[in-house]
Image (cartoon, rainbow, N blue to C red):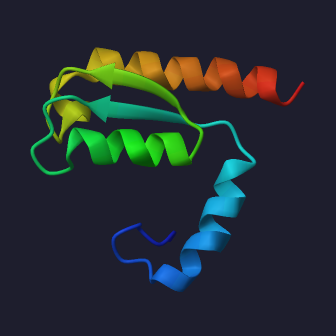
């Protein structure tokens, strides 16, 4: 089980970020999320160098906007295929 960012001690962040920065990533930004501020979502996605897809939805965007999330997953799968060629 991978550590979650919230439970992860600060000294582990560099190793986790370094491993993720070498991979393509996509980030669903939920524009109406009341748990994670929009600016924080954007900052994390920028730090990770992620391709951002902003979706009108709250914290459970996977439930409220399944089509948008499925589209993001499809984009990531196609992009990952091109990344490894």
Report the side of 47 relative to 19 (left or right).
left
Asked where in the image residue 27 lies, by quadrant, the reply is top left
Outermost residue toward the left in this view: 34
Is 34 left or right of 12, judged from the image as shown? left
Residue 15 is situated, as x and y percent measured from the top left of the image, at: 67, 72
Which quadrant is the C terminus positioned in? top right
Which residue does the image show at 15% across and 39% down from the upper left?
A: 33
Residue 22, position as x, y percentages in the image: 75, 48
Q: Who's the residue at 33% across and 22% down the image?
A: 54
Q: Residue at x 40, y 21 (%)?
A: 70
Q: In this view, does 12 lie above or below 78?
A: below
Q: Nearer the viewer, residue 24 or 81?
A: 24
Residue 10 percent across, percent down from the top left: 47, 81
Q: Given the current orientation, which residue lies at the most extreme right position?
A: 85
Could you say which quadrant of the image residue 42 lies in? top left
Task: Give the left or right position of residue 80, taking residue 3 as reference.
Answer: right
Taking depth in this image into account, of 59 and 63 the one nearest to the observer is 59
Residue at x-position 41% and y-position 68%: 4
């Amino acid at each position: 089980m991978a550590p979650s960012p919230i439970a992860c001690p600060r000294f582990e962040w560099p190793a986790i970020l370094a491993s993720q920065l070498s991979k393509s990533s996509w980030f669903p930004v939920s524009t109406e999320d009341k748990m994670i501020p929009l600016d924080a979502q954007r900052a994390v996605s920028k730090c990770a160098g992620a391709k951002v897809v902003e979706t009108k939805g709250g914290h459970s965007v996977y439930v409220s906007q399944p089509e948008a999330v499925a589209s993001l997953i499809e984009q990531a799968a196609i992009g990952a295929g091109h990344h490894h060629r």
